[in-house]
Image (cartoon, rainbow, N blue to C red):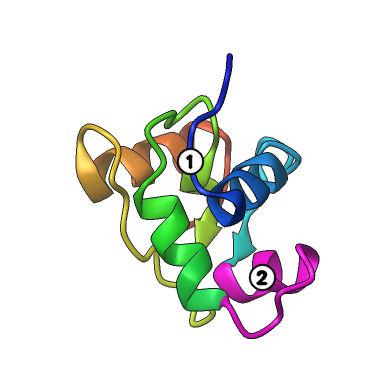
Amino acid sequence: MTLKGTKFQLKVWRYLKSIPKGQVKTYKQVAISIKSPKSARAVANACAKNPYAPKIPCHRVIKSDGSLGGYSGRGGIKKKLKLLRSENVAI
């Protein structure tokens, strides 16, 4: 699969592929992990623009307060919740 996006989006999407099934990270944790600690909002925007969901698992990224945030994949937030539950994530 050849990914198409901005340099930043590609960096975020590549990182998302490393989040193991059944685990979640916050947008802030992802930002820190890609060496852009102040870019949590930009990470959320990159997740929102992910055309490869759920193959690139943006559903594994949640808000710092533990809430789900958004999901731009088909089915919206209900689909995100379903995907996380199917991976045995307690939400």
Provide the secondary structure element on which disc 1 rests. Answer: loop
* Quadrant in which residue 79 is drawn: top left
Residue 74 seen in the current view: yes
Query: Residue 71 location in percent, x, y?
Result: 32, 50
Q: Which residues are magenta?
A: 27-39
Q: Residue at x 36, y 47 (%)?
A: 49
- How crowded pointer 2 is (Cα within 10 Å; few <14, some 14-19, many 20+) is rated as many
Query: Residue 29 location in percent, x, y?
Result: 69, 71
Height in image: 64 above or below 80? below
Residue 63 seen in the current view: no
Residue topped by disc 2: 31
Provide the secondary structure element on which disc 2 rests. Answer: helix
Q: How many marks?
A: 2
Q: Is residue 2 left or right of residue 45?
A: right
Q: Which mark is residue 5?
A: 1
Query: Residue 75 location in percent, x, y?
Result: 20, 35
Query: Residue 30 location in percent, x, y?
Result: 67, 64
Q: What amino acid is at disc 1?
A: Gly
Height in image: 84 above or below 12? above
Q: Residue furthest top?
A: 1
Q: Is residue 35 located in the magenta-colored stretch of the structure?
A: yes
Q: Residue at x 49, y 31 (%)?
A: 4
Q: What amino acid is at disc 2?
A: Ala
Q: Is residue 21 located in the magenta-colored stretch of the structure?
A: no
User: Viewer-nearest of labels 1 and 2?
Assistant: 1
Height in image: 45 above or below 84? below
